[in-house]
Amino acid sequence: MHPLAEAVLAGDVRMTARACRLCDDRLPGYTELLRELYPHTGRAFVLGVTGNPGAGKSTVTNQLIGAYRARGHKVAVVAIDPSSPFSGGAILGDRIRMQRHFEDPSVFIRSVATRGALGGLSRSSLDVVRVLDAWGADVVIVETVGVGQDELEIVKAAHSVLVVMAPGLGDEIQAIKAGLLECADVFAVNKADRDGADATLRDLELMIALSGEVKSAGAHSRGHAAGHLDLAKQTVQHRGGAWVPRVTKCVAAKGEGVAEVVANLDAHRAWQATPDGLARAAVKQRELLQGSLKDAIIEAAAASLEREIERMSARVAARELDPYAAVEELLRAFKAS
Ligand SMILES: Nc1nc2c(ncn2[C@@H]2O[C@H](COP(=O)(O)OP(=O)(O)OP(=O)(O)O)[C@@H](O)[C@H]2O)c(=O)[nH]1
Ligand SMILES: [Mg+2]
């Protein structure tokens, strides 16, 4: 067995940090390590925390660490630094915000840096999540600014997704744009100590109710959107069925409303054991595997066809060849290789 694998499984924090670095930097032997760890993963609850820059994701995460630690859980946090102009230096801030937990040997906090390579960020983050799962984390929280495609991929790989919003920034519109609504399981309207939190809460509830109506093919009239939401919630609670995202307010900076957020996450986790929840998980698993396969194929093709791609793009640019024929020819060459 890989010496690092043994140490990770034994819960060694320093060696686990080294294993994370190995995966993050794709150093020799990282795949072997991950393959050895894989049979020991799948135990951790993976929670994606996303939302716009500055909405309070790290503050909420900090509170969640506290809540899960109070239950005696081992908690890991993977903070993804998008290195975007919005939140440069976010990691430093996060470190300060989570300082209270840095001394705790049952809390592991790790940041993953953005990479240029296609699928690189999501893949190395998922690898790090697996290492932390094998380390024995009961909960792995992945904090990311949900803007890029890469980050959405990470969020999709989580068991539950918490979207943190702040009032008064038109965040709800942003959420739709980024495709966040489809992957949000629980919403937290943070900074409820500021004006506009109730309006954001209502907007979100309406949006959720409307999307439920669209799915149930107009079974309820539009005027009863809120009523439909209640009905849908009851269905989930009493008869199984699809999950309806839950929304509550909180003031993460003061710890207010955090218990409700945790309760909603617990409810979503319980739903995952229902037939609908299991079916949803199977679809997600398939999508995840397809995504990894896509990345691997593109990487392999780009490497083995490097010269042909260059030659073909010059011909396409010169209008000697159309791009459709070029792709067909490249695909033929790749299959033959
Ligand atoms: N008024 C108020 N401010 C808050 C609350 N929660 C967080 N903040 C403040 O909002 C700012 C951003 O909080 P973060 O937790 O760093 O937000 P974030 O979403 O992690 O930010 P990035 O990682 O940079 O995208 C900080 O100055 C927090 O102190 C809250 O409930 N009320
Ligand atoms: Mg943050």
Image (tube, grey):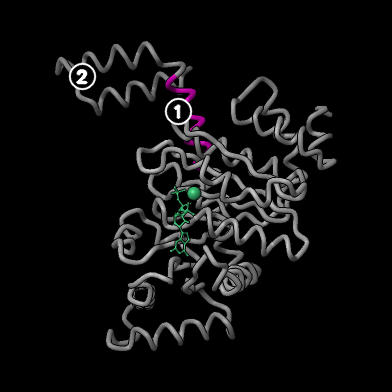
How far apart in space, not on screen, are marks 1 and 2 (Cα)?
25 Å
Q: Main secondary structure of the magenta part?
A: helix
Quadrant holding the N terminus = top right
Q: Secondary structure at mark 2?
A: helix
Instruction: Please say if 198 is above or below 300.
Output: below
Residue, disc 2: 316
Residue at image point 20% right, 19% down: 316
In the depicted structure, whether residue 214 falls above or below residue 300: below
Q: Nearer the viewer, residue 282 or 238?
A: 238
Spot occupied by residue 111 in the image (x, y as percentages of width and height): 57, 39
Q: What amino acid is at disc 1?
A: Ala
Could you say where residue 128 lies in the image, as x and y percent from the top left?
A: 63, 39
Q: Who is closer to the viewer here, 68 or 66?
A: 66
Magenta-drawn stretch contains 214: no
Residue 159 spot, x, y in % from top left: 59, 58
The answer to whether any part of residue 20 appears in the image is yes
Residue 169 picture quarter: bottom left
- Residue 269 image offset from top left, x and y in percent: 63, 67
Foreground mark, 1 or 2?
1
User: Is residue 299 covered in magenta?
Assistant: yes
- Point 77% across, 47% down: residue: 105
Which residue occupies 19% across, 24% down? 322
Q: Residue at x 37, y 77 (%)?
A: 198
Task: Give the label on residue 117, or none.
Answer: 1
Q: Does the beta carbon of the residue at mark 1 sit less than 8 Å from ligand 1? A: no
Q: Are marks 1 and 2 in contact (CB under 8 Å)?
A: no
